[in-house]
Amino acid sequence: QVQLVESGGGLVQPGGSLRLSCSASGNIASIYVMSWYRQAPGKQRELVAHSTSGSSTVDADSVKGRFTISRDNAKNTVYLQMNRLKPEDTAVYYCNTVVRVVGGTTGDYWGQGTQVTVSS
């Protein structure tokens, strides 16, 4: 099994910054991709950014230039640095990973989610 533990959410004022972390653990043989999604109330979950072993990409147009994704392969950890936060960034942020576990099967795993609230 694979576990994802997220941290770093909270309440921040508009224009502020937060850094989310997501660490994967378990019987991991290889991590193919680690991603951040978010879901605001009444909206569909959207892909914010993803990181493969070779590249990192911010996918959501609304956060380009403000958010950065990075990854520490040695720690099986992905980060989301969020700068110049806006009220519309308020959402539950979820970490997702696609991994091959020891034994050969590939699976898709989700973290429990961390709340980010941007408000004055």
Image: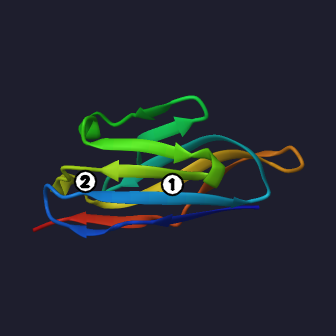
Answer with the quarter of the image where residue 58 lies: top left
Q: Residue at x 30, y 51 (%)?
A: 82
* Residue 32 figure quarter: top right
Q: Name the colour scheme.
A: rainbow
Please state if 19 lies on the left or on the right of 97 as rendered: left
1 to 54, vertically: above or below: below
Residue underneath mark 1: 95
Residue 14 lies left or right of residue 112; in this view the side is left
| Element carrying mark 1 | strand
Placement of the C terminus among the 4 image quadrants: bottom left
Looking at this rendering, what residue extends furthest in the left direction?
120
On the image, the x and y values in percent for residue 107 come to 72, 48
- Furthest residue toward right: 103
Up the image or down, 41 lies above or below 98; here it is below
Give the mark nearest the N terminus, 2 or 1. Answer: 2
Name the residue rendered at 52%, 30% in the picture: 55
Q: Amino acid at mark 1?
A: Cys
10 Å neighbourhood of mark 2: few (<14), some, or many (≥20)? many
- The x and y percentages for residue 51 are 52, 38
State the residue in front, 42 or 73.
73
Q: Secondary structure at mark 2?
A: helix
Q: Is residue 52 left or right of residue 103?
A: left
Marks 2 and 1, Cα distance to the nearest angstrom?
A: 16 Å
Evaluate whether residue 41 shows in this view.
no
The one nearer the camera, 32 or 46, is 32
> Which percent across, then down, holds residue 94?
47, 57
Residue picked out by circle 2 = 89
Number of callouts: 2
Q: Amino acid at mark 2?
A: Asp
Query: Which label was assigned to residue 43?
Result: none
Residue at position x 58%, y 29% from top?
Answer: 54
